[in-house]
Image (cartoon, helix red, strand yellow):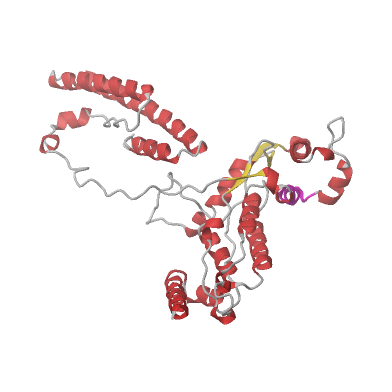
């Protein structure tokens, strides 16, 4: 009986996947052939005229891996009564996910190359195992983590751009632009910095790489592939494994939010002309600059109201312009603070700051 229940669960999940990804993808997944989607069409990192992209020597390779993307189904074809859970045991493609992220963060590697390498890795790892192939498929679908800055544009949604988001981010983090004449010198320096940190035996007493000429005989013109290979070879030392951020729990919207009061709707035409964007309310503590901004805008709003009441519309307009200028400056400050919060992986703070910035949408 329990075997039939497991089989029913498997059939149900297959039906769900069929509804989401289409019958062809599911048939290839569960009827043999594995999962081999087309590579994303992403643009290479570009530099200005006279410059060439090269890796940043201080870039920290990192990855979320894909240990959380597994899904097991009971394989009834290989059912063993002496080991009934054998069909639920699966191989892991976590190594392939880490190597895919290394590729995306290696300056000069194409998105197609990273995609093809991942497919080869999962094929070699899974060797036809359906559970393993399913994990590889889900890791492709869920490879992009939650991003508090991302806005879903349902009207202009571009699936290709979404597929390239992780690759584009990795290249921007890893690449820098240098004059073409300096490119080889910087590349040699990057290689020296890598070996000095992760395999000092490759560097002689004077700080130079041993056998550098032989290195370039083998890798000249394939520098990106070389650095990716080094990242993979030394990944246990070179790659930082991070915890994938998750979206905050859903909070129902306040039914009263956004409702305009009767008093607000009766604003005179003169007051509307002189009005400035409403200042945002502070949403987190320990922000003295934010407090100062709120105090300043409140003071200016009071002056503007008085000027409007006195029918001094020129003064009211001047105060309005000052409020706009102060608000723009505060918006720029909040955007910088949000960028730092994202860099520190403080996504809750970043989300709160994002909401405050959205209050300046009229600027």
Relative side of 113 to 297, left or right: right
Q: Is residue 344 above or below residue 86?
A: above
**Foreground: 44 or 84?**
84
Q: Is residue 202 above or below residue 290?
A: below
| Residue 224 drawn in magenta | yes
| Residue 56 drawn in magenta | no
Asked if residue 36 shows in the view, the reply is no
Question: Image quadrant of residue 77?
Answer: bottom right
Which segment is the magenta one?
Answer: 221-230
Q: Position of residue 313 (x, y in %)?
A: 19, 21
Q: Residue at x 83, y 39 (%)?
A: 201
Number of numbered discs visible in the structure rendering: 0
Picture quarter with the C terminus: top left
**Foreground: 244 or 150?**
244
Question: Image quadrant of residue 354?
Answer: top left
Q: Residue at x 31, y 22 (%)?
A: 322
Q: Position of residue 275 (x, y in %)?
A: 22, 29
Q: Magenta residues: mostly which secondary structure?
A: helix
Q: Position of residue 47 (x, y in %)?
A: 64, 41
Q: Residue at x 52, y 60 (%)?
A: 69
């Amino acid at each position: 009986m329990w075997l039939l229940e497991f089989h029913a669960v498997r059939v149900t999940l297959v039906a769900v996947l069929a509804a989401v990804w289409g019958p062809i993808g599911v048939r290839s997944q569960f009827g043999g052939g594995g999962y081999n989607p087309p590579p994303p069409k992403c643009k290479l990192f570009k530099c200005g005229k006279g410059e060439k992209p090269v890796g940043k020597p201080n870039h920290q390779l990192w990855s979320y891996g894909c240990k959380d993307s597994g899904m097991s189904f009971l394989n009834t074809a290989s059912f063993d009564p002496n080991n009934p859970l054998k069909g639920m045991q699966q191989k892991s493609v976590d190594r392939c996910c880490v190597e895919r992220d290394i590729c995306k963060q290696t300056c000069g590697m194409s998105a197609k190359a990273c995609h093809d390498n991942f497919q080869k890795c999962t094929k070699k790892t899974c060797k036809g195992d359906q559970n393993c192939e399913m994990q590889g498929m889900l890791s492709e679908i869920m490879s992009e983590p939650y991003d508090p800055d991302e806005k879903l544009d349902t009207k202009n949604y571009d699936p290709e751009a979404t597929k390239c988001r992780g690759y584009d981010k990795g290249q921007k983090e890893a690449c820098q632009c240098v004059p073409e004449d300096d490119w080889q010198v910087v590349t040699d320096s990057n290689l020296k910095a890598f070996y000095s940190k992760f395999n000092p035996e490759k560097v002689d007493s004077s700080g130079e790489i041993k056998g550098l000429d032989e290195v370039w005989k083998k890798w000249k013109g394939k520098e990106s592939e070389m650095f990716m290979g080094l990242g993979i070879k030394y990944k246990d030392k070179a790659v930082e494994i991070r915890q994938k951020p998750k979206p905050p729990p859903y909070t129902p919207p306040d039914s009263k939010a956004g409702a305009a009061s009767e008093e607000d709707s009766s604003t005179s035409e003169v007051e509307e002309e002189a009005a400035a964007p409403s200042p945002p309310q502070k949403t987190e503590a320990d922000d003295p600059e934010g407090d100062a901004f709120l105090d300043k805008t409140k003071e200016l709003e009071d002056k503007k109201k008085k000027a409007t009441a006195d029918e001094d519309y020129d003064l009211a307009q001047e105060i309005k312009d000052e409020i706009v200028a102060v608000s723009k400056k505060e918006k720029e400050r909040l955007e910088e603070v949000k960028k730092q919060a994202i860099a520190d992986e403080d996504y809750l703070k970043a989300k709160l700051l994002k909401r405050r910035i959205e209050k300046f949408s009229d600027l």
